[in-house]
Structure formats: C-alpha cells, structure tokens
Image (tube, rainbow, N blue to C red):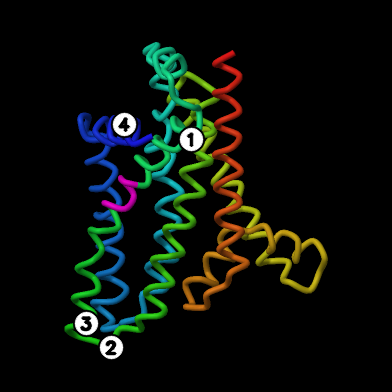
Amino acid sequence: MNAIRKRDLQGFFRSPLGYVYIGAFLAVMNLYFFATCVLSSSSDMSSVFSNMLIVFLFLMPILTMRLFSEDYKQGTDRLLLTAPISVWAIVGGKFLATLGVLLRALLGTVPWLLIILLFGTPAWPAILGCYIAVICAAAIFAAMGMFLSSLTESQLIAAVLSFALFLGLYVVDMLSYSMGSDGILGSILSWFSIFTRYDTFMSGQFSLGNLIYFLSLTGLFLYLTARVLERRRM
C-alpha cells in the first residue's frame, strides 16, 4: 500500500496537476478568508470553511479523475492487477495519496490561525471542528471520485460523473433545507445530507454519529472501488 501511495502522490506532482489544484484552492480560499475575516476583523471562520466544501465540490473531480482512468488508458492497470498485492492495497494507496494532496492544500491555511491569534481571539473548539469536518467530507468526496474513476478509462467522463454526483448531493442538501426537519421527506434528506452533518462539526459540536456516518460512507465507496478492481482482475 505504501508503495502505491508514494507512486501516486509523486505522480500528482510530476505533472502540474497537484500544483494547480493546491494553487487554485489556496487562491480562492485566501481571497475569501481576507474578505470574510480580515476586512471585517472577525475571528469566526465558520463561513470560510462552509464555502471551502463548495470549492472542494468543484475541484475534487479534477483531482480524482486520473486515479484509475489514467492507468486504464496507459495499460499500467495490468501491472497493478497482476502484482502480488491485494486490491485493497491498491485502493488504499491511491486513496491515501489523494488525501496527501488535500492535506497539503489544508496546510496552506495554517497562516490563517496565526493571523487570528495575533489580531483576535480564536475559538479553538470551533476551528478544530472545522478542520475535522473538512477532512471527513473531503475523504468522502475522494472515495466517491475514485470509485467513478475506476469505472471508465476516460478522465473527462470520470470528472463529469464526479461533478454530477457532488452537485446532486448539494441539491439534496438544498431540498432538505427548504423542506425543513418537520416533514418526513425533509428529515430523511437531512439525515443523508453530507453538508448538514458537515455544518454540525463546524459549529464545534462533536457527534460520534456524524463521525461514523462519514467513515461508513467513505468505506462504502472504497469497498465499491475494490469490487470493481476484483472484477477486472478476474
């Protein structure tokens, strides 16, 4: 697994993809942090992290589209699938490599904490909740994007499918919000909504149920990806 992780992580930065992804992410988020927190002299970062998930929604397909599609197109998937390693090692290695890029992008937000510490009073529980929330949600998006990439050798199709899925999840959240939690349908949509659970973490309210939800959904798509690879290996 570690060899796969290193191979794919290096692959992100051998091409401009990793640098473009991190650069685009930090450009958008630093601008929003400046407009929301610096100009208004506010230490409340919840709205910044709320919009961070929207940015991930647009950028994640670009990051995950190549995970398996590129191997299929170049024929290197045959080397992976015939190697004496399990499909779980392949899936886990690629997933950890993707998270490695995401964590590097998040490291670029550390100066925000220093700015708030110098000029304001940080709400550390809420900030910690924001970082936990964004890592959990990003892990789900990464697992979903990787699964869709395992279905096709076209990176463009993988990216479009991922974006359509992420946008669909966002629409479900908007529907649950408009319906409220009083109706049955609204409650069901709210329960399944990644964004609703994300907002709970951002408020600094740790919920074991939400954490289990994030881990379970991530694990589900990793399992589905492993099943796709097992079929290709037969």
Whether residue 117 is situated above or below residue 75 in the rendered picture? below
Residue 94 or 156: which is nearer the viewer?
94
Q: In the rendered view, tell whether residue 16 sits above or below residue 195.
A: above
From the image, tell me which residue sits under label 2: 121
Q: For the stretch drawn in magenta, what is the main secondary structure?
A: helix
Whichever of callouts 1 and 4 sits on the residue coming sooner in the sequence is 4
Q: Amino acid at mark 3?
A: Leu
In front of the other: label 1 or label 4? 4
Q: Residue furthest right?
A: 184
Q: Amino acid at mark 2?
A: Thr
Residue 100 in the figure: left or right of residue 112: right
The residue at which mark 3 appears reads as 117
Q: Nearer the viewer, mark 1 or mark 2?
A: 1
Nearer-N-terminus badge (4/2): 4
Mark 1 in CB contact with mark 3 (< 8 angstroms) = no
N-terminal of the pair, mark 4 or mark 3, is: 4
Q: CA distance from mark 1 to mark 3?
A: 37 Å
Q: Which residue is mark 4?
A: 3
Give, as a single range, the part of the protein colored magenta: 100-104
Q: Residue 207: which quarter of the image?
A: bottom right
